[in-house]
Image (cartoon, helix red, strand yellow):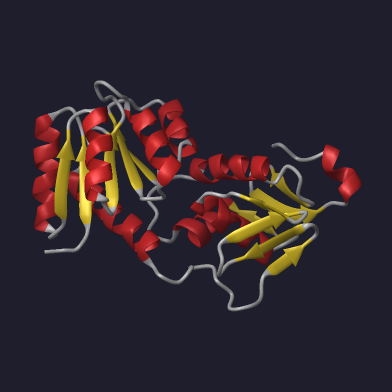
Amino acid sequence: MSDKTILVVDDEPHIIELVKLYLKGENYNVEEAYTGTQALSKFAATKPSLVVLDLMLPEIDGWEVCRRIRRESEVPIVMLTARTDDIDKIVGLELGADDYLAKPFNPRELVARIKAVLRRTSSTEHPLATGRPPMEFGNTRVDVDRHEVTVGGQEIELRSKEFDLLIAFAQHLGLVLERDKLLNLVWGYEYFGDTRTVDVHVAHLRDRLAQSTVNIQTIRGVGYKAVLTDDQGLGVRDRG
């Protein structure tokens, strides 16, 4: 039996039973919850390695469950929904979900995504580590080993993927990075999502770097490029 526990949250018992069947077939431990309240209680009690989270839950919806989990943990979250609207996906990604799957889904695909997310997030060594001293560019300093970023000497908090994006931009300062390239660098070659994921996380990173001399520019139809600005130029920044 695996040492990894998956918390499956859905208000439809047949969905949970189906997912449990396939996950246990891959030797994962499985915990289950049918409401948002149960999900938060089970999460606190079991400390799962990953959460499969339906959005349309009774008592507390999946968005709020995700938001509360993210306040205290970076545990991977794969969201499920019966709706196919892009806005659901965007909101989920903005709240910190790692992947997203629309119902009805193939349980084998869900298991494959879970495995891929766990591989990306379980490595003890940072995938973008350079083995060099902290990187400094403009008024911004990135220490990979300490997982710290400072702007003008003040530490700022970044989520895991925002931190990884910043490292990728720092290592390619002044170069255009296509969205697919950023997906490969930050999410890994096995990521099943689309490039909207990159756009959402770049938007959040820009907000975090509001006082930084690092400006992430949008290259229309291609991707992004990080450049340095002077302190006087901070008022005019690319928000594309």
- Please state which of residues 66 and 46 is positioned toward the viewer in this rendering: 46
Image-based side of 94 in relation to 58, left or right: right
Residue shown at 88% from the left, 51% from the top: 230
Task: Tell me the quarter of the picture where residue 57 sits.
Answer: top left
Task: Point out the image quarter for the N terminus.
Answer: bottom left
Task: Tell me the quarter of the picture where residue 92 sits.
Answer: top left
Image-based side of 107 in relation to 21, left or right: right
- Please state which of residues 194 and 168 is positioned toward the viewer in this rendering: 168
Image-based side of 53 in relation to 216, left or right: left
Image-based side of 55 in relation to 106, left or right: right
x, y percentage for residue 197? 49, 43
> Is residue 49 depicted above or below 127 in this figure?
above
x, y percentage for residue 167? 61, 61
x, y percentage for residue 52? 26, 42
Task: Point out the image quarter for the C terminus.
Answer: top right
Residue shown at 20% from the left, 41% from the top: 8
Residue shown at 71% from the left, 62% from the top: 141
